[in-house]
Image: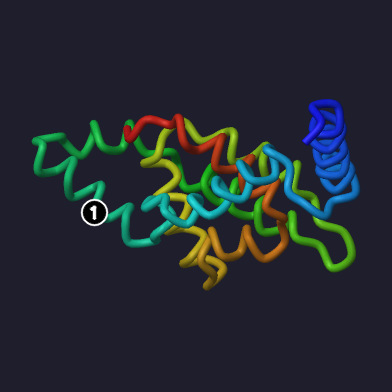
Amino acid sequence: MNPIMLILSVALVVFIFKMFQKIGVTDTKEERRDSRQAYKLEGIKEFDPKEAQRMTDKLVKQGKTKAEILKLSPNLTRMGTIARNIYDSKGFFKDDEIRALSFFNLLKNRYELALLSAYFSKEYKKDLVSYWKSFTNEEEQARLYRILKPLKTF
């Protein structure tokens, strides 16, 4: 095959692939990353409402006093405010994902996430991660994953 024809063929294939990406027929690198991260969101164990109790029990086994544990725990008013604002971010006609993400940004560690999940589950009778996924797309789910992933345990 003629080298010029080969180069033109490769260029045409690359051009068509890029056009497909532009119009959304194929996923971009960022969309594939968001998809993987959105999937990993469910794997964050602190979304389990029972995880807060397990983490508290672990602290007790480590010899932490009640005062030390309370120091790690945010007060109920703060948890209630965060939970209510995340819950209210889902609207009837318009959702406010940015508002919800800003409240997730207030969490200082994964223990607070576990406590928030337990509070949310008890107050609204809904699983926090399932609720979040019910009104967000993969890009927003991936953004939440990127907010929560670097948090320390305590």
The residue tagged 1 is 54
Position of residue 138 in the picture relative to residue 150 (left or right): right
Q: Position of residue 91 (x, y in %)?
A: 81, 62
Quadrant for the N terminus in the image: top right
Q: Report crowding for label 1: few under 14, some 14 to 19, many 20 or more residues within 10 A (C-alpha).
A: few
Q: For the residue marked with disc 1, what is the amino acid?
A: Arg
Q: Nearer the viewer, residue 14 or 140?
A: 14
Q: Position of residue 66 (x, y in %)?
A: 20, 39
Which residue does the image show at 54% across and 59% down from the upper left?
129
Position of residue 51 in the picture relative to residue 85 (left or right): left
Q: Nearer the viewer, residue 71 or 147?
A: 147
Which secondary structure, mark 1? Answer: helix
Which residue does the image show at 42% across and 34% down from the upper left?
109
Q: Position of residue 21 (x, y in %)?
A: 82, 44
Question: Quadrant location of residue 93?
Answer: bottom right
Which residue does the image show at 64% across and 55% down from the upper left?
84
Q: How is the image coloured?
A: rainbow
